[in-house]
Image: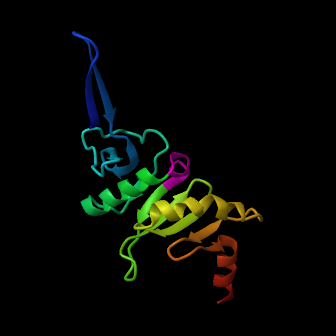
Amino acid sequence: MIEKAELTRRGINTYRLTIKEMQPVAYMPKTNGYIPLLSSGLLDEQNVSKYPIGNEPLIIGFDNNKQLLNELAKQLTKTPAELRNTMSEIVYKPTKINKNRLNINMNDGFQVVIGLANFSTSIKTYPSIVGQVTDGSTGIIDLEVGAFYQSYYNQGRKNKAK
């Protein structure tokens, strides 16, 4: 899909046509393949592929909710590509308290819990938080309100103690 087209005149008989296509920011898995979510918030159902193309994350649980998909696309577009490419899956997990809660499974084994409204701003703190985890563990980074980290190892020890 075309995001922007520009026609410029260069001389008497020369024109230059510049076209900028909307880029996928994520892919939605369906039974027939992967549908790209474009930067505009639209699902490009004309370009279903057998496999997701590139390093964009998969989005799960959004069920063609146009308002949520539009906001997610806007937030992902504001997120630097190098950070977006570290995301494996973005799962929509609403709660009674936060109807726009997301769980992001990262390629390095961490899970990020974050709200959709502040996604592009809060996710930028992810690299510095992970950099502070020096024991080699992975776990859950909660960025809904402030920042909180809980190791999967410590979480398992607490559950066994009950």
Q: Residue at x 56, y 75 (%)?
A: 146
Task: Find the magenta span and give its range.
Answer: 80-88
In percent of width and height, residue 81 lies at 51, 46
In percent of width and height, residue 52 lies at 42, 42
User: Which residue of the protein is positioned furthest toward the top in this rendering?
Assistant: 13
User: Which residue of the protein is positioned furthest toward the front in this rendering?
Assistant: 11
Whether residue 65 appears in this view of the structure is no
User: Which residue of the protein is positioned furthest toward the left in this rendering?
Assistant: 13
Seen in the image, is 80 located left or right of residue 26?
Answer: right
Taking depth in this image into account, of 96 and 73 the one nearest to the observer is: 73
Q: Residue at x 31, y 58 (%)?
A: 69
Give the vertical position of 114 relative to 51 (above or below): below
Q: Residue at x 30, y 57 (%)?
A: 70
Residue 137, magenta (yes or no)? no
Taking depth in this image into account, of 117 and 62 the one nearest to the observer is: 117
Give the vertical position of 6 relative to 138 (above or below): above
In percent of width and height, residue 132 lies at 72, 65
In percent of width and height, residue 100 lies at 37, 71
Residue 81, magenta (yes or no)? yes
Quadrant of residue 14 within the rendered picture: top left
Seen in the image, is 153 located left or right of residue 121?
Answer: right
Taking depth in this image into account, of 159 and 127 the one nearest to the observer is: 127
Q: Residue at x 28, y 36 (%)?
A: 4
